Amino acid sequence: MKKYRVFLLLIICNLFWAGNYVFGKYVVSDMTPLWITFSRWLMASFLLIPIAYFTEKPKWDPIRKQWFLLFFMGISGIAGFNLALYSALHYTSPTNASLISALNPGLIVLVSVFMLREKVSLIQVLGFIFSLLGVFLVLTRGHLDQIFQTEYNRGDLIMIISIVVWTVYSILGKRLRDIQPITATAVSALFGTIIMAPFALYEGINIANITPIAVTGILYMIIFPSIGSFILWNMAIQEIGASKAGIFLNFIPIFTAIISWILGEKVTAAQVCGGILVFIGVYLTTGMLEARLSERARAREIRLEER
């Protein structure tokens, strides 16, 4: 798959996840984090399994040999990350949650370097710094001093746990071999749902308390963040690696700002500048600049040889 297509998939993927923050804040007032996660992935699993079967025709031998990776992907990316995210939204604002999630790409790069031996260039490091600065500009509306003045509460600490768990999921996904992305998402979702089932049944739920807004939110989470984003994420991870894909997570706060603007909130100059910095950072970190420079260098060498 061409790099530009992979990057487009990652942009769409994170647009869907940005909506997850918006709807998540509404749904947590009607349902517990456990039931949000369980109901979301229970229904998503029923859709993902036939989609994987008819579109990818999966081979069961690689799945059987790597079931432990898929099992821990279910624990981390399906159950763990979502439980932590929705628990955090009970105590903290979506802004704080997005701010902390901006640390995720750096953590993925760091772990990828040490565990997966992925190479990171100086330009990629510079790109990460640009992206992170852009995210901070967007979230603080240009007042960077607010980053240090923020009082981090229980929800903020839970968000730190969530980004660690997501890093584990991303690294495990990169280690998969001969398992197609939809199949990987479907099987890990099934594992995650099975793990959560007894706890959800024990906790119970009062259906009468669920509002139409919560139902709409859950439906959105099933179709877009659960099915769409996870499939696109796994496709990208297997194509370009965890560290390069991870930098695109910085688009989540940018898309959140865009959604807020659509809902009537004003967009400031600081947010526009921050968005530009994020795009520059993604351009540098994904190696697109290095690829173009290499192509120009090769073309120059060919011209010299022809002389």
Image: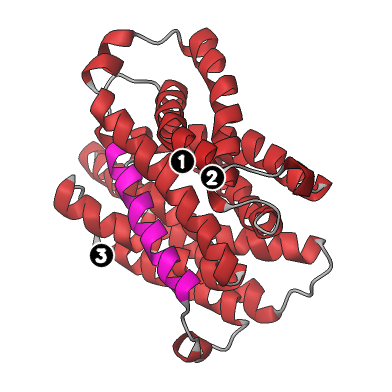
- Where 143 falls versus 90 (above or below)? below
Quadrant containing the C terminus in the rendered view: top left
Q: Which residue, given by chain and number where applicable, does mark 1 sit on?
A: 199
Residue 305 is situated, as x and y percent measured from the top left of the image, at 21, 39
Residue 147 in view in this figure = yes
Q: Residue at x 26, y 31 (%)?
A: 69
Dots 3 and 1: beta carbons under 8 Å?
A: no
Q: Main secondary structure of the magenta part?
A: helix
Residue type of the residue flagged with mark 1 = Phe
Q: Residue at x 80, y 49 (%)?
A: 213
Residue type of the residue flagged with mark 2 = Glu
Q: Quadrant of residue 170?
A: top left
Residue type of the residue flagged with mark 3 = Leu
Secondary structure, mark 3, is helix
Secondary structure, mark 1, is helix
Lower sequence index among marks 2 and 3? 3
Say which of 30 and 180 sits in front. Answer: 30
Q: Which residue, given by chain and number where applicable, does mark 2 sit on?
A: 203
Which label number is shown at residue 58? none
Q: Which residue, given by chain and number where applicable, does mark 3 sit on?
A: 122
Q: Is residue 171 left or right of residue 249?
A: left
Dots 2 and 1: beta carbons under 8 Å?
A: yes
Q: Measure how far apart labels 2 and 3 are at the Cα level.
A: 49 Å
